[in-house]
Image (cartoon, rainbow, N blue to C red):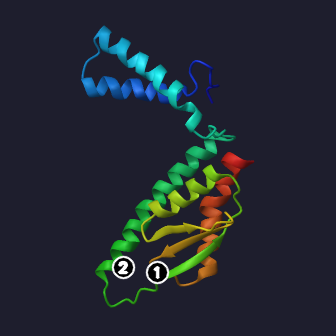
Amino acid sequence: MIKPRPWLPTPLLSILLLAVWLLLVRSTAFGQLLLGGFLAVVIPLATHRFWDAQPHVARPWKLLRFVLRVLGDILVANIEVAWLIVNPWRRLRPHFVEYPLMLEDRFTITLLANTISLTPGTVSANLRLDGRTLLIHALDVEDEEALIAHIRERYERPLKEIYEC
């Protein structure tokens, strides 16, 4: 990971801001590069105190594997939900599940909740005030414990390995 500098607290954000600026103005003229570079340095400097600390990725290859796993699961879940929709004779079993979290960091809990919500057929509905339980709604739940074990093994454990070691 790129170390933050006092004059450039979030280098990746600065690069992204410069790229977005150049795409918005649809020009790579020297003046636009200069103005975009100025904004790419000033905006992060002015806003960095409002941002949480940047997470440290302990194992980047596991992060890549996690992203590919989530993309594959999204594809499979889309097919499963489509199958549920085109088969109206099959009774759905929607259910709210209280998921006990192993994660402690706010960032990784947010990633887990977003991952669950990105997968069709499930949505993370609420994080309890104690930060230890996530309320999940699933479209078709046959076994609550199996769903909890599936989420824990496919998403939560890899996130813990990647970010919380």
Q: Amino acid at mark 2?
A: Leu
For numbered disc 2, what is the local secondary structure?
helix
Residue drawn at the location 41% of the way across and 28% of the way down: 17
Rendered image quadrant of residue 77: bottom left
Q: Amino acid at mark 1?
A: Asp
For numbered disc 1, what is the local secondary structure?
loop
Q: Is residue 30 left or right of residue 150?
A: left
Residue drawn at the location 51% of the way across and 27% of the way down: 46
Q: CA distance from mark 1 to mark 2?
A: 9 Å
User: In front of the other: label 1 or label 2?
Assistant: 1
Q: Could you say where residue 128 lies in the image, as x and y percent from the top left?
A: 62, 68
Q: Classify 56 as above or below 93.
A: above
Q: Could you say where residue 133 lies in the image, as x and y percent from the top left?
A: 65, 69
* Numbered circle sitting on residue 140: 1
Q: Could you say where residue 22 lies in the image, as x and y percent from the top left?
A: 32, 23
Label 1 crowding class (10 Å Cα cut-off): few <14, some 14-19, many 20+? some
Q: Classify 2 as above or below 135.
A: above
Residue drawn at the location 25% of the way across and 18% of the way down: 27
Q: Which residue is mark 2?
A: 84
Q: Classify 8 as above or below 56.
A: above
Tell me if label 1 and label 2 are in contact, CB under 8 Å: yes
> Which is more N-terminal, label 2 or label 1?
2
Q: Is residue 12 left or right of residue 56?
A: left
* Numbered circle sitting on residue 31: none
Q: Is residue 54 left or right of residue 15?
A: right
Rendered image quadrant of residue 7: top right
Taking depth in this image into account, of 10 and 86 the one nearest to the observer is: 10
